[in-house]
Image: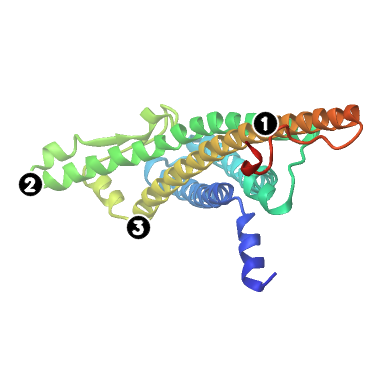
């Protein structure tokens, strides 16, 4: 076998669908965890600088942000290992691997593991759908804040109207109702929107939201691919059993005849008179 044939044989055993799903999951988790962690840090800084003067007003928010950052560390580690396992499962169940490395072999343990991975991936996709929806909340908050700032920039010639335009962090549950000031209005809010910290935090939340969507797409893609592979393996196993049954029946007929079992039809059409 030449080098080209050997390379094509190896490439033929690669589960490309599983590989694409793994790369999507890696990139989505990296985007969600990295941007989400930094966005939470910048959010705490914005609240501390512009919306709260007393430490006791945002100490609960600071603890919640720290808790979510620890959760992000756990998610990154878990999905890193889980994606590697799913890629290995894709190599095991791919039909290309069967065609490359020989006859189909499957054990009860292997089939149970494949079914377990399908169920786990489906459950993770449903749970991650909630994470995807939750990651849209800060994007919604900053979108409203940006829209209010744009309105202030349009109405700069009427200061009385500008001072009535506010963004209240207490309405979103970020601060308690007794927090002072708890909100930013008028030109103060416009100044906040023009800061580098605000723009970077907004962009980071959008990137984290996109990363959550990519991860959800990867989980759905992976669960569907595993299910298709499982159906294919079941059909292949059934086909193998049928071929083996026919072969055993043919062997018994041979032994009953006491010799080679030949075809009842002539091999040469010229023998037919």
Query: Mark 1 highlights which residue?
Result: 234
Q: Position of 239 compared to 17: left or right?
A: right
Q: Measure the alpha-carbon separation of dots 2 and 3.
A: 25 Å
Q: Measure the alpha-carbon separation of dots 1 and 2.
A: 72 Å
| SS label for mark 3 | helix
Which colour scheme appears in the figure? rainbow
Q: Looking at the picture, how far across and down is residue 151, in whole percent?
A: 17, 42
| SS label for mark 1 | helix
Q: Residue furthest left?
A: 157
Q: Looking at the picture, how far across and down is residue 273, in whole percent?
A: 62, 36
Q: Measure the alpha-carbon separation of dots 3 and 1.
A: 57 Å
Q: Nearer the viewer, mark 1 or mark 2?
A: 1
Q: Residues within 10 Å of mark 3 (few under 14, many from 20)?
A: few
Query: Mark 3 highlights which residue?
Result: 196
- Circles 2 and 3: CB atoms closer than 8 Å: no
Nearest the viewer among 232 and 253 is 253
Query: Mark 2 highlights which residue?
Result: 157
Q: Nearer the viewer, mark 3 or mark 1?
A: 1
| Residue shown at the point (47%, 44%) measured from the top left | 214
Figure check: 27 above or below 147:
below
| Residue shown at the point (45%, 37%) measured from the top left | 135
The image quadrant of residue 143 is top left
Q: Residue furthest bottom?
A: 3
Q: Position of 206 compared to 227: left or right?
A: left
Classify the position of the N terminus by image quarter. Answer: bottom right
| SS label for mark 2 | loop
């Amino acid at each position: 076998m030449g080098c080209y044939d050997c390379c094509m044989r190896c490439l033929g055993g690669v589960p490309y669908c599983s590989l694409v799903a793994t790369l999507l999951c890696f990139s989505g988790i990296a985007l969600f965890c990295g941007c989400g962690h930094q966005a939470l840090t910048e959010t705490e800084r914005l609240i501390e600088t512009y919306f709260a003067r007393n430490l006791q007003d945002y100490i609960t928010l600071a603890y919640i942000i720290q808790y979510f950052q620890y959760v992000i560390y756990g998610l990154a580690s878990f999905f890193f290992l889980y994606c590697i396992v799913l890629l290995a499962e894709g190599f095991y169940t791919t039909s290309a691997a069967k065609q490359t490395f020989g006859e189909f072999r499957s054990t009860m343990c292997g089939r149970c593991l494949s079914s377990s991975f399908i169920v786990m991936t489906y459950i993770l996709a449903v749970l991650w759908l909630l994470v995807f929806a939750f990651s849209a909340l800060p994007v919604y908050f900053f979108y409203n804040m940006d829209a209010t700032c744009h309105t202030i920039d349009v109405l700069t010639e009427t200061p009385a109207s500008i001072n009535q335009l506010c963004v209240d962090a207490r309405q979103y549950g970020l601060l308690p109702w007794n927090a002072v000031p708890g909100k930013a209005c008028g030109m103060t809010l416009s100044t906040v929107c023009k800061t580098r910290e605000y723009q970077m935090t907004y962009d980071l939340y959008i990137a984290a939201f996109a990363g959550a969507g990519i991860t959800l797409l990867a989980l759905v893609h992976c669960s569907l691919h595993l299910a298709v592979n499982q159906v294919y393996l079941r059909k292949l196993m059934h086909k193998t059993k049928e071929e083996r049954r026919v072969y055993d029946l043919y062997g018994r007929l041979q032994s009953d005849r006491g010799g080679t079992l030949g075809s009842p039809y002539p091999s040469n059409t010229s023998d037919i008179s």
